[in-house]
Every structure is written in C-alpha cells, then in structure tokens.
Image (cartoon, rainbow, N blue to C red):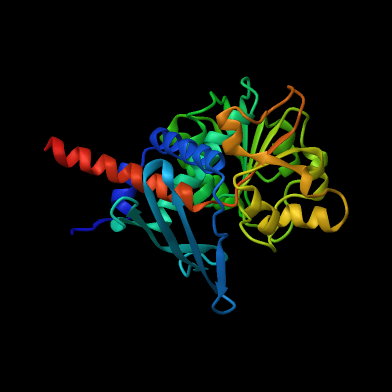
Amino acid sequence: MTIAYYDAERVERLLDYPGCTAAVRRAMRSLSETGKAQPLRQIVRIDERTMFGVMPGDLAAIGSFGAKLVSVAEDPARPGRSRHRGVVVAYAADTAEIEAIADAEAVTAIRTACATAAATDALARPDARVLAIFGAGTQAETHVQALRHVRDFDGVLLWGRSVDSTTALANRLSQTLGLAVEATADGQRAAGEADVICTVSGSAEPILFGGWVRNGTHVNLVGSSMLGPVEVDSALVAASRYIADYRPGALAQASELAIARDAGIVTDDHVVGEIGQVFAGTLAGRERPDQITLYKSLGHVAQDLAATAYLHRRALSEAAER
C-alpha cells in the first residue's frame, strides 16, 4: 500500500481556510454528539527547552483514527519563540491501514485558526466589525486569514511584545489581504475597541484583563494548551460564558480555568459545554448581545484528523482529474 505524504508546502496549498473551517466544524460536532471518551494530550518533558506531545484519537464521522506526534522546542531562527515539528498520522477506520501522513506544523497552524473561526462564527455577534489579535507569531497570521472568512471586519488591531515584528506583520497582512491591520503597543486600547479578541501568544502571564473587555465581546483563548502558561486573568474567565473545544480536556489542562478554580472564583460548572454542542444546536452559544462569550481552544486531534482527511481528499480529487 502506498502511503500519501504531505509536506508543509502541499499542506498549505491544499488546506484552504473555508474548507478546513467546515471540516473542523463537522469534526467537533461529531466529537460532542458521539460522546466517546478521547485520550487527553500527553506531554513528555525532554529537557528545559523541548517537549514531546502525543495526541491520539478517533473520528468516526469521517472514518479515521490516528495521532499527532509533535516536538515543541525553541526555534533557533526566532529566539524566544518555539516551533512544532512532527506529523499527523491518519488511519482508515475500515481497513486499519495508514492512509496519510501530513506535516504537523503546517496542519496545526491552519486548523487551529480554522477551529477558532468556526467558534467565532457561532459565538460572536453578527455585527462584529473589529478584531484584536494578542500575539504576533504564526498563529496571529493564520487567525487573521481564517477569521476574515466568517465576519466582515473593518479592521484588525495587532498587539505583540516586539514593536518591530508586530509592525512588520501588520504591514504584510494589510498588503496581502487588503485589510486594515494596525500594530499597537496598547493592549487595553486593542481590547476596548474589539468585538472579537484572539489570544495566541503562549504567554506565561496574563496579557489580557477582564476590566479591558467590553460587554458583548467574543474572546478566543488559544495560546496556552497546557497547565502553566496563562494569557488572561481570572476576572475575564469568571465574567464569560465559557465554552470548551473538549470539556474533559479543559477541566484537566486549561491553565486559566485551573487558576480561577483553585482561587475559588469558579467551579467546573463554569464550563457550560463544548463548541460541538453549539454547532449541533443542543447548547446555546451567545445568549444575549451584551454577553461576553469565551471559547477555550486547547486543540484536539479530531481537528488534525479532519484537516488531514480533507486535504487528502482534495489531493485524490486533483489526481483523478489529471
């Protein structure tokens, strides 16, 4: 049997944002509707600089199971930032054979943003016009790319620790997307003007605070995927309608939730449900216009498998047409 391999270049070509967003939406709905327990992400600390993550799971809706294997280590080319290196291995459920292997870094960069886009489409106000991104790395770029497909934003405010790199990214996105993207060093101003906020920084300490966020805002917490790093304070967690990608994962590994819970500010019941339930219509997302909604994205292998299956189908379709 020939196993299809998709390197980063092919992943980026085949994994278009609208198609990936739709695939991830279906996957997360299936995850919630099936109710089958999934293993939580396992993280092995190799040394002070390197972690190894294993994310196994299955996605019955598309007949696939598999795992993502990825290392997270500092990128020598970008001091202070990390890279994800690894693969997504997708098996066909009917034959139990490996169907496709894809570059995990490229898949993760796109599917994470597409999962956020799907959640934003379900939870943000229909009239949302200003997007704020906290962070200026790869996920900042892919999030702008993905979210512009679910809301007609008038502008984007981009906050990052480095003024130079944040300005460079804002200028590049403005030119390539024809969208007004402004770099700012004032996080409070960015949050105060935004209708949708995404935190994609992986910060060890809060960079976004509840007192900055207006009523009616939708917030996506993306950058922290394990206990330890926190991007927002407990006031914001407590003030929000909190919806997880996968509830058992959030209860065990969502750092911002854990800190608020340990302080006695919230309980496990604060996690009202999963985004897949919102997609299915069995859980209310936004209940009223002035509510702060929050989507916690830890990342789930169902998203990786769905993205890999989608790009594999596109590749097979292209090959059949030739």
Percent x, y of residue 205:
73, 58
Q: In which quarter of the image is residue 235?
A: top right
Q: Is 308 on the left-hand or right-hand side of 70?
A: left
Can residue 121 be seen by looking at this rendering? Answer: no
Q: In which quarter of the image is residue 158?
A: top right
Residue at image point 55% right, 38% down: 33
Q: Is 49 on the left-hand or right-hand side of 16?
A: right
Which of the two residues, 163 or 283, is positioned nearer the viewer here? 283
User: In the displayed image of the protein, which residue is found farthest to the right?
Assistant: 264
22 to 152, vertically: above or below: below
Which of the two residues, 27 or 194, is positioned nearer the viewer here? 27
Q: In which quarter of the image is residue 99?
A: bottom left
The quarter of the picture where the C terminus appears is top left
313 to 138, vertically: above or below: above
Q: Is 104 on the left-hand or right-hand side of 264?
A: left
User: In the displayed image of the protein, which residue is found farthest to the left?
Assistant: 322
Percent x, y of residue 53:
51, 66
Can residue 16 be seen by looking at this rendering? Answer: yes
Which of the two residues, 119 or 182, is positioned nearer the viewer here? 119
Which of the two residues, 221 or 279, is positioned nearer the viewer here? 279
Q: Is 310 on the left-hand or right-hand side of 300?
A: left
Q: How many labels does the image show?
A: 0
Percent x, y of residue 294:
69, 39
Percent x, y of residue 273:
67, 40
Residue at image point 68% right, 32% down: 194
User: In the displayed image of the protein, which residue is found farthest to the top?
Assistant: 127
Residue at image point 76% right, 41% down: 188
The quarter of the picture where the N terminus appears is bottom left
